Image (cartoon, rainbow, N blue to C red):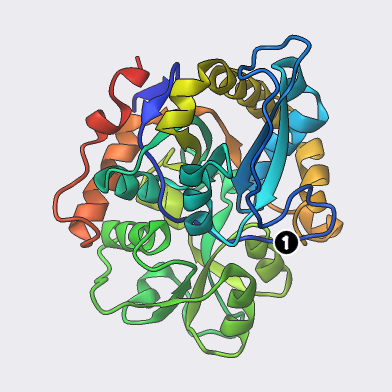
């Protein structure tokens, strides 16, 4: 597949994604107060531009927190203030209004937003699925069932009720895509919208047959004995882009140096996170509720500022196949000349 690095701002992005995991000491809040900019541009120097960055407070955000801790943003003349939100849907209006200068969301939301003409631009990838489901060290998303569930394999999910955090988004689309590849009939599956923090309880109470979760909830579920029967992201499309950072078109136009500096810092942070997994496990406990012992056992994201355009094309086709859009989004138009 064609793996492409973002080199300049890209016209796209994001309607809704996952959910917040509020924690003490997270360095942000759910509000989206305006950031002050003392120089209007990044790239280092004596002045500092403050960026409110809307995130959902999950494991992939660790690279950004490490970038803050290691001074990668400061080197670009930037101060990042994380704002943990109730989900991607809450991040979008904050970015459009200017209360948030940067936000993150998943690729389905990115393509949906592009179809709706929202004035947003991707500035960097964040993380992606591993190349193979056998790379269990990097499978951070999956469908869990109770330890006493009669469901023993992905094929048993046919006709069942599965919890997802947002209907008609990356969860149910990739679950259907992964199951369809295995020949499982997906039309009879029912999806129930439940916030991530409530999913394990819903599973335990038998409100649902299965639950799609991300880390840290995936690790927490496994720790209590729940079993994973489907790695939906990687089984739907290897190296599937999972989240990306975006800004408004007006902000990108007015502050090109800030956008470039943010992208440069995130690339350095992504590389650092990849090379220092122990530091990722440590810092993730500072902005999520995952206990340190669970963090030591959890799978780690595949951090990258690149976006696999081939996997995005596969995702766009799944969106059409499963009824999110009438026509498959034009991935070439989404990425356009920003990739090369």
Report the side of 113 relative to 263 (left or right).
left
Q: Quadrant of residue 41?
A: top right
Q: Circle 1 — which element? A: loop
Residue 239 percent across, percent down from the top left = 44, 38
Q: Which residue shows up at 52% across the image and 57% down it?
A: 90
Q: Which residue shows up at 34% across the image and 44% down it?
A: 118
Decide: is 46 above or below 128. Answer: above
Q: Which residue shows up at 45% across the image and 16% down it?
A: 7
Q: Which residue is mark 1?
A: 22
* Nearer to us in this view, 134 or 201: 201
The quadrant the C terminus occupies is top left
Residue 183 percent across, percent down from the top left = 25, 64
Residue 129, visible in the rendered structure: no
Residue 228 percent across, percent down from the top left = 55, 66
Residue 92 percent across, percent down from the top left = 47, 50
Report the side of 230 relative to 325 (left or right).
right
Report the side of 169 relative to 70 (left or right).
left
Decide: is 131 above or below 292. Answer: above
* Nearer to us in this view, 292 or 108: 108
Q: Residue furthest top?
A: 45
């Amino acid at each position: 597949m064609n793996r492409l690095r973002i080199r300049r701002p890209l016209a796209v992005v994001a309607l809704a994604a996952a959910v917040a995991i509020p924690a003490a000491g997270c360095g942000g809040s759910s509000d989206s107060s305006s950031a002050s900019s003392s120089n209007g541009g990044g790239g280092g120097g004596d002045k500092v531009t403050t960026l409110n960055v809307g995130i959902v407070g999950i494991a992939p955000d660790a690279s950004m927190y490490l970038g803050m801790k290691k001074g990668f943003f400061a080197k670009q003349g930037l101060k990042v203030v994380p704002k943990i939100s109730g989900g991607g849907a809450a991040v979008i209006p904050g970015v459009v209004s200017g209360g948030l200068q940067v936000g993150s969301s998943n690729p389905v939301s990115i393509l949906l937003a592009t179809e709706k003409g929202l004035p947003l631009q991707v500035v960097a990838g964040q993380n992606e699925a591993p190349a193979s489901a056998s790379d269990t060290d990097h499978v951070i998303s999956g469908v869990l069932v109770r330890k006493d569930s009669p469901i023993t394999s992905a094929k048993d999910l046919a006709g069942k009720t599965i919890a997802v955090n947002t209907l008609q988004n990356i969860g149910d689309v990739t679950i259907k895509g992964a199951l369809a590849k295995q020949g499982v009939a997906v039309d009879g599956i029912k999806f129930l919208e439940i916030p991530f923090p409530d999913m394990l309880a819903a599973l335990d109470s038998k409100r649902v047959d299965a639950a799609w979760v991300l880390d840290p909830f995936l690790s927490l579920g496994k720790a209590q004995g729940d079993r994973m029967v489907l790695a939906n992201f990687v089984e739907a499309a290897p190296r599937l882009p999972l989240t990306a950072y975006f800004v408004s078109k007006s902000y990108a136009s007015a502050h090109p140096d800030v956008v470039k500096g943010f992208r440069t810092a995130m690339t350095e942070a992504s590389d650092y996170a990849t090379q220092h997994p122990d530091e990722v496990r440590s810092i993730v406990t500072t902005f999520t509720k995952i206990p340190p012992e669970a963090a030591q056992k959890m799978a780690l994201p595949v951090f990258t500022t690149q976006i696999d355009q081939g996997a995005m094309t596969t995702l766009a086709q799944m969106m059409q196949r499963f009824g999110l859009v009438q026509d498959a989004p034009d991935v070439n138009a989404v990425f356009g000349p920003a990739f090369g």
